[in-house]
Image (cartoon, grey):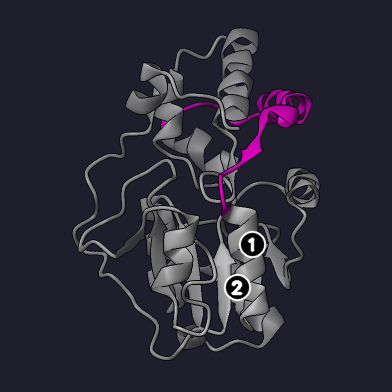
């Protein structure tokens, strides 16, 4: 069970004003591939990120609150540092990485996501994960989830979100047309990446951020996500 969010957490997760120029994109055909973000969609990693950031603040004397960091979730760490005006030295990244690995046991899958992924796969969908989190921290979490995915993409040579590169790489790897893919995210940068990649987008209402405008389809929970997809899997999750 995920740990209750504190009042500070809720303040931290209020996004800046949505970008009104990002249109809601829907698939042009019935989706074949459903791609998931990880933080805020598959796993509640907020306690891990909060602890890791506080360790960065103390160790490196950085006067930036977690609330500011949290508003930029979904972007690669180096991008977040640049936007916060924090010098992105190897030591800062290493401190955050070590603390994140040490505290990773505190991450919890969101209720119903494992069952939803299994239902989608049983209904003939391919599934994947596209996240800005480093692969070294992604794979151990996915092993805990107990689901198999057809593709897992993290930033390597590609740019991270909101650039569409990692989504496009997942499409190329699976041989999927963008119009036949759907991305499930929880931050405005996820929505923008989907728009730029040409895929559909559903916003995970159980996650950390608000969608951009015009508002896309929003799934209240994992079961609702399944119900939003074509009827071949409808009703399979109570």
Cβ atoms at labels 1 and 2 below 8 Å apart = no
User: Where is 81 relative to 228, above or below?
Assistant: above
Q: Quadrant of the N terminus?
A: top right
Whether residue 128 is visible: no
Q: On the image, numbered disc 1 is attached to which residue?
A: 129
Q: Magenta includes 110?
A: yes
Q: Residues within 10 Å of mark 1 (few under 14, many from 20)?
A: many
At horizontal 59% and vertical 29% (from top left) the residue drawn is 49
In reply to whether residue 182 is colored magenta, the answer given is no
Q: Could you tell me residue 231's position as x and y percent?
A: 45, 83
Q: Quadrant of residue 109?
A: top right
Which residue does the image show at 46% across and 57% down from the upper left?
185
Rounded to the nearest whole Å, what is the CA distance between mark 1 and mark 2? 14 Å
- Residue 120 is tagged as 2
Foreground residue, 173 or 30? 30
Instruction: Name the side, left or right, on which 37 lies relative to 186.
Output: right
Give x and y (percent) for residue 144: 78, 46
Residue at (66, 88) in percent of width and height? 175
- In the image, 83: left or right of 16? right
Q: Which mark is residue 32?
A: none
Query: Looking at the picture, how far across and down is residue 12, in whole percent?
Result: 38, 27
From the viewer's perspective, is 15 left or right of 27? Answer: left
Estimate the x, y position of residue 166 in percent, counting from the top left: 60, 66
- Badge 2, how many Cα within 10 Å: few under 14, some, many 20+? many
The range drawn in magenta is 84-112
Q: Which sits in the foreground, 232 or 218? A: 232
Q: Secondary structure at mark 1?
A: strand
């Amino acid at each position: 069970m995920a740990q209750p969010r504190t009042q500070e957490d809720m303040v931290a997760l209020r996004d800046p004003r949505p970008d009104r120029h990002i249109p809601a994109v829907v698939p042009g055909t019935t989706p074949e591939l459903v791609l998931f973000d990880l933080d805020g969609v598959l796993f509640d990693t907020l306690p891990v990120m909060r602890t890791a950031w506080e360790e960065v603040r103390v160790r490196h004397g950085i006067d930036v609150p977690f609330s500011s960091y949290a508003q930029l979730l979904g972007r690669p760490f180096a991008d977040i540092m640049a936007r916060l005006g924090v010098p992105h030295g190897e030591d800062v990244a290493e401190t955050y990485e070590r603390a994140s690995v040490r505290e990773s046991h505190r991450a919890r899958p969101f209720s119903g996501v494992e069952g939803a992924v299994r239902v989608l796969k049983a209904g003939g969908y391919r599934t994947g994960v596209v996240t800005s989190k480093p692969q070294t921290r992604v794979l151990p979490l996915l092993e805990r989830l107990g689901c198999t995915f057809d593709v897992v993409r993290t930033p390597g040579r590609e740019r991270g979100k909101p650039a569409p590169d990692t989504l496009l790489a997942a499409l190329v790897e699976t041989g999927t047309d963008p119009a036949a893919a759907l991305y499930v995210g929880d931050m405005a940068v996820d929505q923008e990446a989907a728009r730029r990649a040409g895929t559909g987008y559903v916003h995970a209402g159980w996650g950390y951020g608000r969608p951009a405008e015009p508002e896309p389809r929003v799934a209240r929970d994992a079961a609702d996500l399944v119900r939003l997809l074509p009827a071949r899997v409808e009703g399979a999750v109570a």
